[in-house]
Amino acid sequence: MFRFFKQVSVIVLTLMLMLSTSAFATTREDAIKSGFIYNFARYSQGEWFHETTAKSYNLCSFNSDFVEAAKLTLKDLSVRQVPVEVRFLRSDIEDIKGCHTLFISKNDIAKWNDIIIKDLIPNTMLVGEFNNFILSGGHINFFIVGGKVRFEINPNKLKQAGINMSSKVLRLGRIYKGPL
């Protein structure tokens, strides 16, 4: 009986460790992505963000886990002397127009498709993390290579949205060369 209890305890402990490691990896990845997005905002210019009229730089997402990680990562930071505010969007009907950057997670592809159809996102930096995000209208897409977060960027789409990205950022990413 003791041997059975010991085996079950080891299995439960192993499962708990696996789940907590997975959750930690996801939180860490979201924190890294939010840091990238913060730097995208810092190293861009254009009509999309006016620090003279904005009360905050608004990073928005439908993904609550990403929002929580971004809030912790970007706490007390600012973009051009304007505080960063991370907003959780509960539905695609919410005021996306108040967002300077919209992050679409791989779990929000259906919402992304609705947003694109309704054309709710003028002058907003669009960042995602799933295959064909740029092809479907996004500007910057995250992907993982060798356990590291990397990004692909479409400077032409950014310019169409009134965003001029610094060459420092463009050198760090993979430039999208597919169809517009």
Image: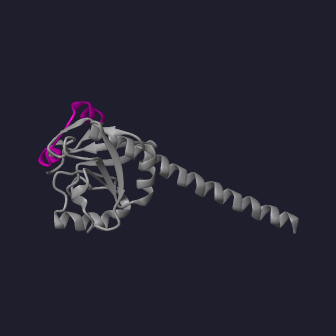
Horizontal side of residue 180 vs 152, given as left or right: left
Image: 92 above or below 41: below
Residue 64 belongs to the span the image colors magenta: no
Predominant secondary structure in magenta?
Answer: helix
Rendered image quadrant of residue 13: bottom right
* Residue 168 on the magenta segment: yes
Q: Write down the quadrant of residue 4 in the picture.
A: bottom right
The answer to which of 143 and 88 lies nearer the viewer is: 88
The spot of residue 179 in percent (x, y) is: 15, 51
Q: Position of residue 42 (x, y in %)?
A: 28, 37
Residue 176: x and y in percent read 22, 44
Q: Is residue 82 above or below residue 26?
A: above
- Residue at 31%, 55% in the rendered image: 131
Q: Which residues fall within the magenta stretch?
A: 157-172
Mark count: 0
**What colouring style does the render use?**
one colour
Q: Residue at x 71, y 61 (%)?
A: 11
- Residue 146: image x %, image y %? 44, 42
Camera-side residue of 106 and 68: 68
Question: At 18% across and 67% down in the image, what residue appears?
Answer: 117
**Which quadrant is home to the N terminus?**
bottom right
Vertical order, 103 against 107 (above or below):
above
- Picture residue at 22% right of the left edge, 31% below the top: 167
The extreme top residue here reads 168
Q: In this image, 123 relative to 32: left or right?
A: left
